Image (cartoon, grey):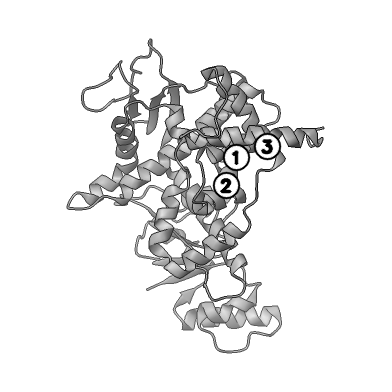
Amino acid sequence: MTVTICRPLVDRSNLPALLACQQDCNQAQATCNSYCERQFHQNGFLMPGQKLKDPAQKDNRDYVDIIVALGMAKEGFDWIWCEHALTVGYRSSLTEIVQIIGRATRDAPGKTRARFTNLIAEPDASEEAVTEAVNDTLKAIAASLLMEQVLAPRFEFKPKHQESGPIPGFGYGEGGYDPNRCNVGFNEETGRFQIEIKGLAEPKGKEATRICQEDLNEVIAAFVQDKTALERGLFDEELVPEELTQVRMGKIIKDKYPELDEQDHEAVRQHAITALNLTQRAKQVALGGVGDDAEEAANTALIDGVRRFAMDVRELDIDLIDRINPFGEAYAILAKTMSEESLKQVAAVIAAKRTSLTPEEAKELAVRAVRFKKERGRRPSLTSQDAWERRMAEGAAAFVPYKDEGRYE
C-alpha cells in the first residue's frame, strides 16, 4: 500500500503519532524535516511532491492508495481517483466543506460513486471537561449536516396555485403531473428539483430572489452552526419545532440580511428551511435502503426520498414543513452510535443551560401572535392543544412586561 502525506512539516508534535516515529523530533526544523522524510520512506509513506506531482502517473488509478492531508488538500488539489473523503474533527466554513467534498467528486473512468465520512468523537461521560467535548460534538454534527446539504440536489420551490402546471424538461413520476395536488418534478439532465408547495412565500426583491436561487446553503450554514438552534434541536424534549424553523431561523436571516424587508425575510426563511428539511427527510430513505437493490436505490435515494415525502402527505405546505425538527434525524443517528451514558451526559449539559424566553424571542413570538390573530380572527391561546399556538401565546404574554421594562427602547 502506498500512502502519501500531504501537509507542511511545521507542527512536529503530531509526527510521532502519525508516523509511528519513536525518536525525539525536538531538533532544528531543517534537520527534523530531513529526518522525518527518511521516516516517511522507512514506514511506507512518500512525500506529496514525489507522488501526486508526477504527470506520468495522473492516469494510474493504483498509483496512490491513501492520501493523508492536513490543510493542504483543498482548493487546487486534484487526484481524480479519490472515491472516499474522510474528515476528522469539525469544519466551520461552508467554503472549506465544499472544497473537501470536491476532492472526491471528480469524474474518472470506472468511478461510479463517492463516499464522505465525518468522524465525530464521542464525549467520555467520565471526563471532567465534558462541556468542551460536547461543543466539539455539536460542531462536528453541524459539519455533517452541511456536507449533506452541499451534496443535495438543487431545489427550485414554487408556490402551488390553481393555474400551476408542468414545466418542460421535468419528469413527475408515474401518472405525470397532477393539477389537484402539489407536484415534485425532476430534471435528469440538470439534476434539479422543481417542487410545488402550498402557501410558500415568493421573494419580491432582486437580492432576495438571488439568495433563494444561489445562497440558500449559506443561510443553512449559519443556521446549523447556531449553537442555540443545534442544542435545542438535538436535546430539548419540550421543543416546539416552529421555535427553530420560524423564530430562530427568522432571526438569523434578519441578522444576516438586514437590508431585506419583512416580506423578503419571510420568503428567504421559508425557502431555506424547506431545503434543509426536505434534505433530511430524503436522508431517511437513503439510510433505509436494504436488499439486493440497495446500492441502486442509494444512488437515487435523495430523488426518491423527496418525491416519496411529497406523495405521502395530503398536501405539501409550508406549515407542515415548519413543524419538522431539522435536527431530528441527526439525533436519531447520534442515539444509535453513542452510548446511553454519554447521550445522557450530553443532554444534561444542554439542559443545564436552558433559560426562559429572552426579550428578542418574546418579541418575535409576539409578532407571530399578531399574524395569527389576523389570519384566524382570535389570539393564540395558552390552553390550546397545539404546542406552537401555546408558545406564541407565551411569547405574547412575556413581551408585555419586557416592553414595560423598556427592553425595546
| Camera-nearest label, 2 or 3 | 3
Rendered location of residue 134, percent (x, y): 57, 63
| Image side of residue 226 versus residue 167, left or right | right
Pointers 3 and 1 in contact (C-beta within 8 Å): no
Q: Amino acid at mark 1?
A: Arg
Q: Residue at x 54, y 76 (%)?
A: 126
Give the Cα separation between the discs numbered 2 and 3. 21 Å
Q: Quadrant of residue 314?
A: top left
Q: Nearer the viewer, residue 5 or 146?
A: 146
User: First in sequence: mark 1 or mark 2?
Assistant: 2
Q: Which residue is mark 1?
A: 248
Say whether disc 3 or disc 1 marks the residue closer to the N-terminus: 1
Residue of label 2: 229
User: Is residue 173 at all visible to an observer of this figure?
Assistant: yes
Circle 1 residues within 10 Å: few <14, some 14–19, many ≥20: some
Q: Residue at x 62, y 23 (%)?
A: 370
Q: Helix, strand, or loop for circle 2?
A: helix
User: Is label 1 in contact with label 2 (beta carbons under 8 Å)?
Assistant: yes
Tell me where residue 37 appears, x and y as whole percent. 56, 78
Which amino acid, by three-letter code, is at mark 3?
Ala
Q: Name the residue carrying label 3.
A: 398
Note whether 77 is above or below 50 in the view shown.
Answer: above
Type of amino acid at the residue the image marks with label 2 = Ala
Can residue 58 be spotted in the picture?
A: no
Give the residue at x 44% y 54%. 331
* Gap in angstroms between the C-alphas marked 3 and 1: 17 Å
Residue furthest toward the bottom?
23
Real-space Cα distance between discs 1 and 2?
A: 7 Å
